[in-house]
Image (cartoon, rainbow, N blue to C red):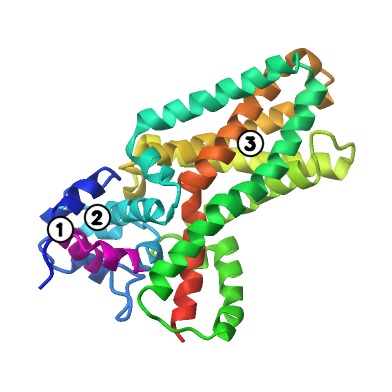
Amino acid sequence: MAAINIDFGKKLSEFGAFDFNACYNCGTCTAVCSLSTEEDSFPREMLRFSVLGMEDDIKSSLKPWLCYYCGQCSTYCPQEANPAELMMSLRRWLTSAYDWTKLSGLLYRSLTATITAMVILALGVVAFAISEKFDLGRIMHTGHLFEMIAIGSVFLIILLPNIIRMWWLIILKPGIRVPLIKYVSSFWDLILHMFTQKRALDCDDNRFRWFEHFILVIGYLGLLFTTVFLDWFASESLFVIVLGYFVSIIVFIITIDFVYDRIKKTKEISKYSQPSDWMFVVWLFLMGISAFGVRLFIDLGIMERNIWLYLVHMIILVQWALIIVPFGKWTHFLYRSFAMYFQKVKES
C-alpha cells in the first residue's frame, strides 16, 4: 500500500491551492462539470491524488489540462474546497515539473524573485540604451533583432525540451506504446486546439469567454507577426501599418476586459488571481498599448524626441519574452494544446 505524502499539500499550497483537504469526496464537482466524462473523470480524482500526494500519477495525467476553469465545480462545492483553483494550481505545479531550468517553480512560488528578475531585465535595457548613447535607430534595430532571436531561442532552448519532458512523463514513462503514424495523423488536433481552444466551447455558459480568448489569440499572434516578421515599426506599407494598429487595439481592448474582471471578482474564475495571472494580462495589455504608442509617435514624427516610449516598450517586450513566455502563465497555452494532442495520440 502506497504511503500518503502529506508534504505534497504544503508544496502545492505554494502554487495557489486552497484547503483541498476540506473535500470529503462527495462527487458534486464531477457531476456538475460539463467536460468530465466516464473516461476522463475530474476534478474529484485530482483532488484525491492531491490529498494523498500522488505526484507521479498527477505528472502522468492530462486531466489538469483538460479543465478549462469554468468555475462550476467551486460554485457548487458544499465544502468550499475550491476544486477549480486546485486544478489551476496543479497546472502551475506541472509547469514547474516540466521545466528543466526549474525557474518556473521559483517564479511561481516567489513574487520577490519575479520582481527581482523583472527589475534586472529593465536595468539591462536601460544600460544597453546608455551604451548606445540613446541612438534611437540603433536601439530599434537591436530591438527588432532581439524579437527574432528570442522567439527561436526560447522555443528551442527552453520550451521544446519542456514539451519533450511532458511527453516522456505522459506517454513514455507509463509505458504507452504509440505508433509513429498516430503522431502524424493526430497532428492536426495540436494545430486546431492551439489556435482555437475549441474544447472550451463544451463548458456551460462559456461561449463569450471562449470568443474573447480566441480573439485575443488572433490579436496576439497578429501583433507578433506584424512587429517581428513585417517589421511594423520600420515599415512604410499602409497595409502593414493599419494591420499593426488593428491587432494592437484588439490586444489591449480584450486585456482591459480581463483586468476588469479580475478587479471586480464577480466571476468564479477571477476570484483567486495569483501574481502570475495578473502579470500575464497586464503585460500583454502593456505590450499592445506601448506598441500602438510607438507606431503612432513614428507616424506623427515625434519618436526621436520621445525615445523613452520605445525604451518602455522594449523593457515590456524583454520581460515578456524572457520571463512570462518561457516561465509564466503563457506556457499554459502551449502545454494545454499539447495535452489535447497527447490525449488524441493516447486514444490509439
Question: Which numbered disc, 3 or 1, marks the residue closer to the eye?
Answer: 1
Kind of residue at badge 1:
Asn
Please name which of the two marks, 3 or 2, marks the residue nearer to the observer: 3
**Spatial distance from mark 3 to mark 1, Cα to Cα?**
44 Å
Residue for badge 2:
75
Foreground of the two, 148 or 2: 2
Which residue is drawn at the image coordinates 74% and 41% (left, top)? 227
Segment tinted magenta in the rendering: 45-61
Give yes or no for contact between labels 1 and 2 (Cβ–Cβ under 8 Å).
no
Mostly what secondary structure, the magenta segment?
helix
Relative to 330, residue 196 above or below: below
Which quadrant is home to the N terminus? bottom left
Residue 194 picture quarter: bottom right
Q: State how far apart marks 3 and 2 are (Cα).
A: 33 Å
| Residue 280: x %, y % from top left | 48, 40
Q: Which is nearer the N-term, disc 3 or disc 1?
A: 1
Q: On the image, numbered disc 1 is attached to which residue?
A: 5
Would residue 206 appear left or right of 287 to someone viewing this image? left
Give the x, y percent position of residue 260: 44, 36
Kindly report the distance in space between the C-alpha atoms of the residues bearing marks 1 and 2.
Answer: 28 Å
Nearest to N terminus: mark 3 or mark 2: 2
Inspect the magenta stretch and tell me whether residue 59 lies in it: yes
What is the three-letter code of the residue carrying label 3?
Answer: Gly
Q: Which residue is mark 3?
A: 288
Q: Quadrant of residue 183?
A: bottom right
Mark closer to the observer (1, 2): 1
